[in-house]
Amino acid sequence: MNAPEFKKLPGVLAFQRGLVITDALFFNVLKDGQTPVMVVRHGIRGTQNVNKEGDAEKSTAANAKRQEVSNIQTTDTAKLDEEAQALAVRFGLRFLDLKDVLFACAPASTDANDLVRNYRDSVTGFIERAKTSPGLDEVAQRFARNIANGRWLWRNRTIARQVEVHVSVNGTPLASFDALATPLNHFDNITDAERQVAAYIADGLRGDDDAGLDIEARLDFGVRGALEVFPSQNYVEDKPRGFARPLYCLGSPERAGSRNGIEFESTRTMGHAALRDQKIGNALRTIDTWYPKYAEHGRPLPVEPNGASLEAQEFFRDRKTSAFEFARRLNTLDPASDEGMFMIASLIRGGVFSGGKE
């Protein structure tokens, strides 16, 4: 029989992500159809605007040096077609049966022989309780709200005048939402349309239905023309001097022209603009209002084991309230409690939970 709590977690313990998700591609909405929004690489001449604190007392005409004002850069930009009426962004999403999220569970050299077997039983027991719990429905409704409110559009949402989100299943419309009228910072007053989407999510997590959701947002920015929009940015280590930012895109870039003065072109098409699946997943799982400082902070966090927030540069969960601690107590967790719902969401997130030496 399993103990109420495990003194340590197995030496090898990992959960796979409980949702299958695609990148979100950008499209121009034209009068007669849609075309891809492309990422273009080009040069710009900006100005130097670094906040440099100087020593005013030592700044004299004798020792003054001329500083470079121009800031010559190569950068990537994604812009709508000049005839575009709106931006469309779409991706696909499917939730896995929770019983399949345990990816690896194996002992370390110092682990007791029965630790792995008992822990597997603990995970299975918690998931079985979760599937019959209202806690799973609450988690599903929170994911549904973040689909509806367009949080996953990131900066594009903040500059839009109007955002419509449409959800369909196997080509059949399921629900539509006014994203800007749907709350971002709480999960109260779930609408009937949100419940419809949540029902498909919950069925997927329970293993009752593996149907995927097709999600499309249509953004009206209140202006027409070649407006800049914002796909994901790529992180580049040791990027070349003078290179500002690379944007995420799919497909192969155009071949660069030669520099003989004839074939050279000042712009280069890099690929089809998109939001990365990881960035969308982060937005969808921004449902953690169960952390201790929620009343003070006032905003949901992405579900992370230690409550990590890149925005606030802070961990909002300590050792006693982390997913690693709750993972030791699966046998006693009520899936409908705040801790239990956070743990359901943590299993959906996935990650490595391996325990160290005792």
Image (cartoon, helix red, strand yellow):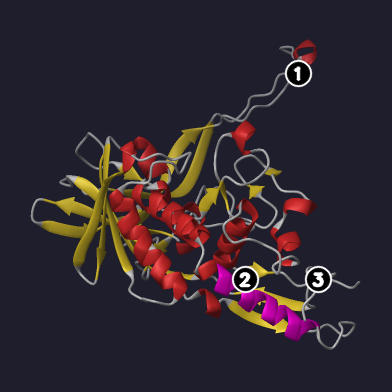
Residue under label 1, please give it: 63
Distance CA(mark 3)–CA(mark 2) = 14 Å
Residue 6 lies, with reference to residue 160, above or below; the image says: below
Task: State the image coordinates of residue 40 (x, y, percent, origin top left).
Answer: 35, 54
Please state if 139 lies on the left or on the right of 118 as rendered: left
Task: State the image coordinates of residue 8 (x, y, percent, origin top left).
Answer: 83, 71
Q: Nearer the viewer, mark 2 or mark 1?
A: 2
Please state if 325 lies on the left or on the right of 275 as rendered: right
Q: Which residues are magenta?
A: 115-129
- Secondary element at tag 3: loop
Residue 195 visible in the picture = yes
Residue under label 2, please give it: 126
Alpha-carbon neighbours of circle 1 within 10 Å: few (<14), some, or many (≥20)? Answer: few
Name the residue type under label 2: Phe
Q: Earlier in the sequence, mark 2 or mark 1?
A: 1
Residue 244 lies, with reference to residue 34, above or below; the image says: above
Give the camera-side residue of 50 and 277: 277
Name the residue type under label 3: Phe
Task: State the image coordinates of residue 81 (x, y, percent, origin top left).
Answer: 21, 49
| Occupied quadrant, residue 272 | bottom left
